[in-house]
Image (cartoon, rainbow, N blue to C red):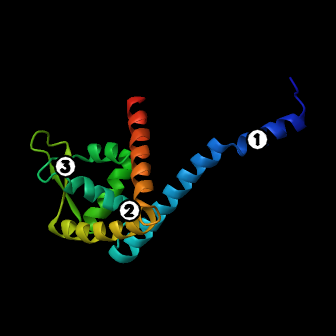
Amino acid sequence: MDDTPQHHDDAAVRAANSPLVRDFGLLIKSATRLEQRIDSALRRECGMSHTMLEVLIRLCRRPGEEVSQRQLADDLTLTSSGTTRLIDRMEEAGLVRRVPSPGDRRVALVEPTAAGRTAFLRAAAVHAEVVEEYFVRPLAADDYARLTGALSAIDKALREGA
């Protein structure tokens, strides 16, 4: 086996320029840029972050469902302390409130306020506009269907492989 610095450089160049690296990088860059567009539009037009919208989506999905801070942390893949700080900010903004769990007073449940539900509806509309403009509209309908089908298959494989 050739162990020269030149051989290592050539191998590194090939690996860094491989189609797999390029294609996966394109997926990550696109998702990151779309998330940044959504976040800036939400901050500009609604005064909330994309993560705050994700909390409100989770809380508004099934009215009356009891959702604890721990469940939010798990659902949003945030740390426990990160979730606490996020809920603190959302509570200060009047978007959510913490209530003790009837089953366990040590557990804090989080629920949207009326103002939080109103803010959610506005933010959901802004989110939809950005997603439509940068995720849906650039693709032909067939390509969009193939893309979402492919993403579903990838998500399923990742969930099953966990």
Counting from the top left corner in percent of width and height, residue 31 is at 49, 56
Kind of residue at badge 3: Leu
Point 47% across, 65% down: residue: 138
Asked where in the image residue 3 lies, by quadrant, the reply is: top right
Asked where in the image residue 49 lies, by quadrant, the reply is: bottom left
The residue pinned by badge 3 equals: 109
Residue 14: which disc? 1
Identify the element where label 1 is drawn.
helix
For residue 94, say whether it is visible: no
Residue 1: which disc? none
The residue pinned by badge 2 equals: 50
Q: Which of the image's four quarters has the C terminus?
A: top left
Kind of residue at badge 1: Arg
Which one is closest to the eye, mark 3 or mark 2?
2
For residue 14, say whether it is visible: yes
Point 33% across, 74% down: residue: 46
Point 35% across, 56% down: residue: 85
Answer with mark 2 or mark 1, whichever residue precedes in sequence. Answer: 1
Answer with mark 1 or mark 3, whichever residue precedes in sequence. Answer: 1
Separation of disc 2 and disc 1 at Cα?
Answer: 37 Å
- What crowding class fits label 3: few (fewer than 14 Cα within 10 Å), some (14-19), or many (20 or more)? many
Viewer-closest of 89 and 47: 47
Residue furthest top in the image: 1
Separation of disc 3 and disc 2 at Cα?
Answer: 21 Å
Separation of disc 1 and disc 3 at Cα?
Answer: 51 Å
Point 36% across, 70% down: residue: 129
Kind of residue at badge 2: His
- What crowding class fits label 2: few (fewer than 14 Cα within 10 Å), some (14-19), or many (20 or more)? some
